[in-house]
Amino acid sequence: MEGTHAELTFGIGRILLTEAEIRQRIGDLGGQISQDYAGRNPLLVGVLKGVVFFMTDLLRAITIPVSVDFMAISRYDPQRQAKGSVRLTKDLDEAVESRHLIFVEDVVDTGLTLSYLLRVLRARNPASLEVCVLFNKPAHRLVDIPLKYKGFDLPDRFVVGYGLDYREAYRHLPFIGELKPAVLQLT
Ligand code: IMP
């Protein structure tokens, strides 16, 4: 296991992606975005909190002028509301009309959250809107969303680290690890 995270890795089974693998892939994504968006000053938009780890590393891998903004959401009770519908608890600071937006997301599972947020952004008439996702979990996808920039495909496992949490724990691990089923069953 990398680094000095021994006591934090309680409950982690297999490591699926190391810190070095993640760093290298984000470097590739930053390079691609820099080429594709030269002269367009893109606005990277993310949803707090999990994406901040990916967002900051991605921004530093981008070599053209770029801006960043965040929103925050809370999920509605899925028993009572349409699946995937969310409430914005913090909106963007910047107006996005006529901007080139890249929606940056840490993980996409069913795709319901992402598709809802893309609808919200599209209604504001950006000049363009693409998605950059670091971890793609295609096994339970319910909505087909074009992912222009994609870091890794992950298997159908609950994973933590690099921004992904389990009940707010494990976010700050620098790698992606599988949570032991026993930990999930404790709840
Ligand atoms: P979706 O609407 O099903 O795509 O939900 C995506 C959200 O589910 C993410 O923003 C995460 O909060 C959460 N999520 C999905 N899979 C994982 C995982 O393996 N680890 C941690 N969080 C996950």
Image (tube, rainbow, N blue to C red):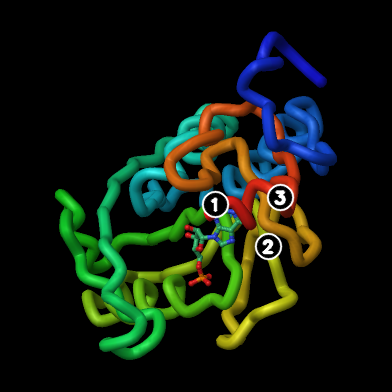
Local packing at callout 1 (Cα closer than 10 Å; few below 14, some 14-19, many 20+) is: many
The kind of residue on which mark 1 rests is Asp
Local packing at callout 2 (Cα closer than 10 Å; few below 14, some 14-19, many 20+) is: many
Residue linked to disc 3: 182
Against 55, residue 4 (above or below) is above
The kind of residue on which mark 2 rests is Asn
- The residue lying toward the viewer, choosing from 39 and 18, is 18
- The residue lying toward the viewer, choosing from 181 and 36, is 181
- The residue lying toward the viewer, choosing from 69 and 185, is 185
The kind of residue on which mark 3 rests is Ala
Whichever of callouts 2 and 1 sits on the residue coming sooner in the sequence is 1
Label 3 close to label 1 by CB (< 8 Å): no
Residue linked to disc 2: 136
Q: Position of residue 37 (x, y in %)?
A: 52, 52
- Would residue 118 be found to the left or right of residue 140 on screen? left
Q: Is residue 64 visible?
A: no
